[in-house]
Image: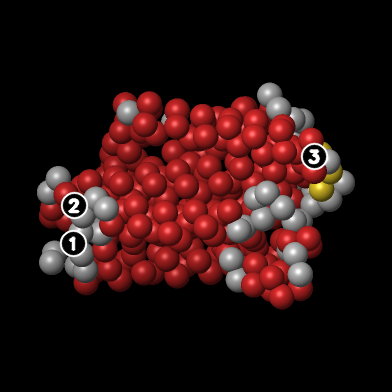
Amino acid sequence: MNLALNLVAAKTIIRKEMVRVLRIWVQTIVPPAITMTLYFIIFGNLIGRRIGTMDGFDYMQYIAPGLIMMSVITNSYGNVVSSFFGAKFGKHLEEMLVAPMSYATIIIGHVAGGVLRGLLVGALVTVIALFFTRLEVAHPFITISIVLLSSIVFSLAGFINAVFAKKFDDISIVPTFVLTPLTYLGGVFYSISMLPEFWQNVSRLNPILYMVNAFRYGILGTSDIGIGQAYIILFVFVVLLFSGCMYLMRRGIGIRE
């Protein structure tokens, strides 16, 4: 299939996604900014004063990378699942399927839109964090690569959720009952070294733990897990989820049914 046509198609989908995010910024950008500000005030400022330090850092400083990563994860996922399901519901997905573009282009275009929204909100939350604490990036490459890979993983996961969703309620089930609990139990607000050994081992089954800790290592230089492990898990998830998206598109599952 013509590479030039696919590049034009990908740019068009990405542009559509960004216009959508910016057009309804009151829904896509403002709510996470307000939510994270409340987290910083309540957990970081009020509760953090009683906790003191964690791993040698002020509690507000310790939770800041986790809150930034949490905003990136939820917004990357939410953007793709709502956008692609909207394309299905509005019946304009058929126009993309009959157009001269590959399935990979459709996936990459929507995932890129999710990544851009995730990074945009993440950057905004970072600015908010700087009003509450001091952040100095210890390892820039690790910080950037981890946030990009994590955003890609959850954008792909959102795409799969949207493929299987049959009604609007279906796009909120996974974020509510899976994504939110895993995020809260992913070491955003605490170090797993505080847990008994059994629960430390259980926590290591949570992939978000590796993303949060690797991102925290990139900014603060401290982590509960090996950074190499985090990269391996992220790359494996990217390959598996992208392959799953391609399989679903080729079989027409949830699309041509």
The reply to whether discs 3 and 2 touch (Cβ–Cβ < 8 Å) is no
- Front residue of this view, candidates 148 and 184: 184
Determine whether 109 is above or below 240 in the image.
Answer: above
Kind of residue at badge 2: Lys
Percent x, y of residue 25: 38, 27
For residue 196, say whether it is visible: yes
Mark 1 lies on a secondary structure that is loop
Determine whether 245 is above or below 140 in the image.
Answer: below
- The local crowd at label 2, few if under 14, some if 14 to 19, many if 20 or more residues have their Cα within 10 Å, is some
Q: Is residue 169 left or right of residue 240?
A: left
Percent x, y of residue 40: 65, 34
Residue 255's tag is 1
Say which residue appears at 72% left-offset and 38% top-offset. Answer: 47
Q: Which residue is mark 2?
A: 88
Kind of residue at badge 1: Ile
Kind of residue at badge 3: Arg
Say which residue appears at 32% left-offset and 28% top-offset. Answer: 24
Mark 2 lies on a secondary structure that is helix
The reply to whether discs 2 and 1 touch (Cβ–Cβ < 8 Å) is yes
Q: Which residue is mark 3?
A: 50
Q: The N terminus is located in which quarter?
A: bottom left
